[in-house]
Amino acid sequence: TADELDARIRSAKATLGDRVVILGHFYQRDEVLRHADVIGDSFQLAQATTSRPDAEAIIFCGVHFMAETADLLSGPDQSVILPNLAAGCSMADMADLDSVTECWEQLEDLYGTAPDASGRVPVIPVTYMNSSAALKGFCGEHGGIVCTSSNAQTVLEWAFERGQRVLFFPDQHLGRNTAKAMGVPLTQMPMWNPRRALGGSTEEQLGDARVILWHGFCSVHRRFTVDQITAARAEHPGLRVIVHPECPMEVVDAADENGSTDYIGKAISAAPAGTTFAIGTEINLVQRLAAAHPEHTIFCLDPVVCPCSTMYRIHAGYLAWVLEGLVGDAETAPVALNRITVASDVADQARVALERMLAARP
Ligand code: 13P
Ligand code: SF4
């Protein structure tokens, strides 16, 4: 039962004490998050990774790319454990090293590699945190950087100081929404289309691009629509609509605000009591915020329940399983199978791109 699992997790965690730290993303189920030592958005969890160098194991209740990042930023003797290896991210899977490399080579053919008179290179690659370590390594190697939804504008400013244009992957929406807010016209944000480019019309396709967008998206945030916002506003006068920047541009434009999962929580906490919010992000977070803020009315913009199915794959049973594995002999326990280790040939460069991001934050 749920109570038994809860007791098993508490008991294993108490036995392990400071040997483990549990990190949990805001989208995780309540029955998992109640055991987390740190809860945060993807940037905060990346930072939290470095805050407990004494812990021998970091149990990451989130998705695969977040656990890879934790492995990159943690100490050499620490192990990062993802309780269920099937917890991936469909957006992160939309860009792979081969296709990004192919794109990059075509951009080099088009724009060359020589810096301009002010020292800016033709293209800087920027990867959203929601990407494989291999792509973070690609960015490290090619003068690029990582961003999250909470620092995308700062990171794009960093990139424009060093490059004439940016190749942004995998999330077209975060790239477009951020660049638009910075004043980049839509006509200068073409979407990379490998088929057209391979057909030989790269120049025509890309023109005077400042941000070249990859064709990835989040299947959860893509569900939010302008019609939902219109209907919610009609029903709730004075409604405040906050959406995640992974939503399509029209939705972000129709909302009152957009921001990372942490931003959404802070905006709700700071609002005067009695505010009504419609939130465009994953349902576990929206429901938790609604329960934590009885002084407000908070609901999800999508009337059909909207979970991230891969975040959802970490449930209390897996957390109990890995913790109990650590209590036993970690060499033979199932927990060894769930260790996330970034291959050494990409780790150094991936770390370079992540450290540029950590240093770029204002
Ligand atoms: P945050 O960085 O806002 O937590 O977003 C991560 C994510 O995967 C949103 O879908
Ligand atoms: Fe990936 Fe979307 Fe889930 Fe975030 S909500 S982890 S982007 S699939």
Image (tube, helix red, strand yellow):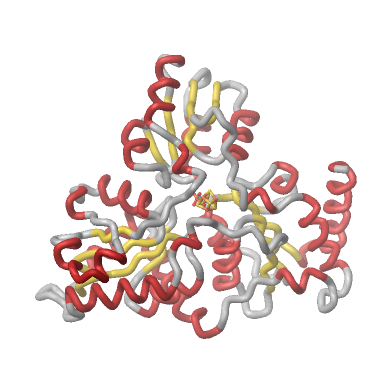
Residue drawn at x 84%, y 72% is: 333
In this rendering, the answer to whether 278 lies above or below 61 is above
Q: Residue furthest bottom?
A: 345
Task: Name the foreground residue: 95 vs 141.
Answer: 95
In this rendering, the answer to whether 10 lies above or below 163 is above
Find residue 321 and report its image quarter.
Answer: bottom right
Residue drawn at x 39%, y 27% is: 227
Quarter placement of the N terminus: top right
Residue drawn at x 35%, y 65% is: 126
Residue 38: image location, x then y, percent: 64, 53
| Left or right: residue 360 compared with residue 208 | right
Task: Name the foreground residue: 319 vs 270.
Answer: 319
Residue 29: image location, x then y, percent: 68, 44
Counting labels gives 0
Residue 250: image location, x then y, percent: 32, 37
Task: Name the foreground residue: 255 vs 169.
Answer: 169
| Left or right: residue 14 compared with residue 199 | right
Residue 217: image location, x then y, percent: 43, 52
Q: Residue furthest front?
A: 199
Quarter placement of the C terminus: bottom left
Residue drawn at x 43%, y 65% is: 95
Find residue 210 and report its image quarter.
Answer: bottom left
In this rendering, the answer to whether 330 lies above or below 155 is below
| Left or right: residue 225 compared with residue 52 | left
